[in-house]
């Protein structure tokens, strides 16, 4: 549990720090995910998730970090689950290359979807109510992804959001989290 909540706190703190430095000290163009630069500047596989295009965008993702921390506190995912999520972070960003129309990206939402997928894999391996909870969260994740039509346009304007969203990032994150969770948590016990 400690590693999981530490990762949640680190993601939130680094995203907040990036937002505070975003003006002149650390312009987002130097650290956001950009398809043309990712192979020459691999740090963007990590820092791209820390860039947010508005305070509303940041606050929503900070809330997502809190939800994942609370789920981790309640389910005690352990160090292997945290490692799976940690590895899924840059894989989520690499997955964005599969959406050729997405040239720039910023935000934690793809990485947060990876964390949810890791938790689903972990919970699915348990018994009783925990397995049922994992199935319910997994079904909710699948329905959310389908409703967003991630294979459609790379960016979407959504009512209530002050920035366009990139649904493919959510799919890339969920896929990376599922893959890493399945590889690192195979047969894992509580």
Image (spheres, grey):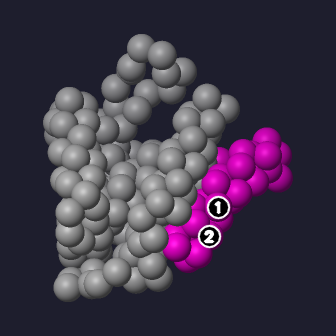
Q: Which mark is residue 6?
A: 2
Q: Quadrant of the C terminus?
A: bottom left
Q: Is residue 72 above or below residue 184?
A: above
Residue closer to the observer: 30 or 122:
122
Q: Dot 2, crowdedness within 10 Å: few (<14), some or many (≥20)?
A: few
Image position, residue 27 (x, y; %): 71, 48
Q: Is residue 18 visible?
A: no
Q: Is residue 152 above or below residue 31?
A: above
Q: Are marks 2 and 1 in contact (CB under 8 Å)?
A: yes
Q: Main secondary structure of the magenta part?
A: helix
- 25 drawn magenta: yes
Q: Identify the residue shown where x is 21% and y is 83%.
A: 186
Q: Which mark is residue 85?
A: none
Describe the element under mark 2 as helix, strand or loop: helix
Q: Which residue is mark 1?
A: 9
Image position, residue 73 (x, y; %): 52, 62
Tell me where the magenta segment starts and ends, as one range: 1-28
């Amino acid at each position: 549990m400690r590693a999981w909540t530490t990762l949640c706190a680190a993601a939130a703190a680094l995203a907040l720090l990036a937002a505070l430095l975003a003006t002149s000290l650390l312009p987002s163009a130097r650290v956001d995910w950009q398809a043309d630069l990712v192979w020459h500047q691999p740090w963007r596989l990590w820092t791209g998730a820390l860039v947010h295009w508005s305070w509303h965008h940041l606050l929503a993702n900070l809330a997502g970090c809190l939800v994942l921390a609370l789920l981790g506190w309640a389910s005690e995912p352990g160090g292997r689950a945290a490692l799976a999520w940690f590895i899924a972070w840059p894989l989520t960003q690499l997955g964005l290359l599969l959406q050729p129309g997405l040239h720039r990206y910023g935000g934690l939402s793809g990485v947060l979807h990876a964390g949810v997928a890791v938790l689903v894999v972990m919970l699915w391996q348990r018994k009783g109510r925990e397995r049922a909870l994992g199935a319910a969260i997994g079904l909710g994740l699948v329905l959310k992804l389908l409703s967003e039509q991630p294979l459609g346009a790379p960016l979407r304007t959504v009512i209530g959001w002050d920035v366009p969203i990139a649904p493919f990032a959510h799919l890339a994150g969920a896929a990376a989290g599922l893959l890493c969770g399945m590889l690192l948590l195979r047969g894992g016990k509580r």
